[in-house]
Image: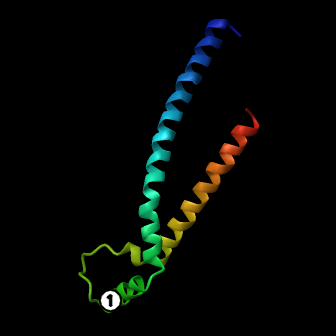
Amino acid sequence: MDPVKRITEMERILNDHEDLIKNLRDAIEKFEKHQGEYQKLSDYYSSEVYFDDLKRYDKGELPKNLPCGVLSEDAVFDLFGDNFNVAIEMLELATNILKNH
């Protein structure tokens, strides 16, 4: 391979990966900071207050225009699964990177 092409390609890889790492660090920081909010949702979802709110919704006691996705078992359950799976994916990726370092 031509050295100019090789160096150009390697420079692109270097720059791309630096950008990816910066973006990943930003995303991980935001994700980590939001885990407290996530825990608040988890606590709500498993509380009596959640079931009281669900009963109010079912009885039509809440405003019609109130977004109530949080009262959907599927939406919250899916989020819990996604949060767990993302954590596993991060561990698997980190393990793979460490093994190949």
The residue most toward the top is 3
Q: Is residue 89 left or right of residue 80?
A: right
Across and down, in percent, residue 39 comes to: 47, 66
Residue 86 lies, in percent from the top left, at 58, 55
Amino acid identity at mark 1 = Arg
Q: Is residue 14 above or below residue 70?
A: above
Give me the residue at 76% from left, 39% from top. 99
Give the camera-side residue of 76 and 52. 52
Which quadrant, please, contains the N terminus? Answer: top right
Categorize mark 1 by other alpha carbons within 10 Å: few (<14), some (14-19), many (20+). Answer: few
Quadrant of residue 101 within the rendered picture: top right
- Count of number-bearing discs: 1
Q: Residue at x 56, y 29 (%)?
A: 17
Q: Under tag 1, what secondary structure? A: helix
Give how far across and how far down residue 2 sits, in percent. 68, 7
Relative to 16, is 6 on the left or the right?
A: right
Q: Is residue 26 visible?
A: yes
On screen, 32 above or below 17?
below
User: Residue pushed farthest bottom?
Assistant: 59
Question: Between residues 16 and 26, which one lies in front from this camera angle?
Answer: 26
Residue at which label 1 appears: 56
Q: Is residue 91 above or below residue 78?
A: above
Residue 75 is at least partly visible in this image: no
Drawn side of residue 3 relative to residue 78, left or right:
right
Q: How is the image coloured?
A: rainbow
Looking at the image, residue 64 sits to the left or right of residue 86; the answer is: left
36 vs 77, nearest the viewer:
36
Give percent across and percent down for residue 94. 66, 43
Identify the residue shown where x is 59% and y is 24%.
Answer: 13
